[in-house]
Structures are given as structure tokens and as C-alpha cells.
Image: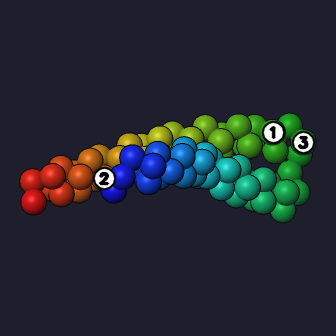
Amino acid sequence: MNQEDKHNWTLLQNKWRFFPYLTLGIVIFSLNSVTNLNFFLKGYVVLLEAQIGIVLLYFLMGKLAKTNKKKDKFKVME
């Protein structure tokens, strides 16, 4: 892999970094637009869903990063 391909791959990874958060926002919006709750209760539910979703995404992305590092380590050893 030459330097230009590596640079293009890095740019592609940076563009897709926010995709899980965008997906989380769309899911939260969809779930809350369907419900018929009180206005204040709906706002409270949105905040709870967003906080829980961001924390879960944080740990999931951390776990995926660890598995990718392990795969890269094994490729270097081969």
C-alpha cells in the first residue's frame, strides 16, 4: 500500500467516524416521533435515550478499536 492509498484510506475512515452517531440520532428521532407522550416527558425521554446511546456507542467503538489493533498486530507478526 503506497502513501497515497494510505492517505485516502485515512480520509475515508474520518468521514465514516460520525456515522454511528448519525444513526443513533435518526433512531432516537424515529422512536420519539411515533410516541404520543406529554411534551416534557418526551424531552426527558430524548435526553435519556441520547445519553444511554452515546455511552453504549463509546464502549462499542472502543471494543472494535481494540479488536482492530489485535488484527493489525497479528498481520505484522506474519
Give the residue at mark 3.
39
Q: Which amino acid does label 3 sit on?
A: Phe
| Tally of numbered discs | 3
Give the residue at mark 2.
68
Give the residue at mark 1.
43
The answer to whether the residues at label 1 and label 3 have Cβ atoms under 8 Å apart is yes
Q: Which circle's residue, 2 or 1, is located before the other in the chain?
A: 1
Residue depicted at 23% across the width and 56% down the height = 71
> Which quarter shows the C terminus?
bottom left
Residue depicted at 78% across the width and 59% down the height = 30
How far is mark 2 from mark 1, CA to CA? 37 Å
Residue 73 in percent (x, y) is at 18, 50
Q: Which circle's residue, 3 or 2, is located before the other in the chain?
A: 3
Residue depicted at 61% across the width and 52% down the height = 19
Task: Answer with left or right where residue 43 lies relative to residue 63.
Answer: right
Q: What residue type is labelled 1?
A: Gly
Q: How is the image coloured?
A: rainbow
> Neighbour class for label 1 at 10 Å: few (<14), some, many (≥20)?
few
Front: mark 2 or 1? 2
- Classify residue 59 by image quadrant: top left
How far is mark 3 from mark 2, CA to CA? 43 Å
Secondary-structure class at tag 3: helix
> Neighbour class for label 3 at 10 Å: few (<14), some, many (≥20)?
few
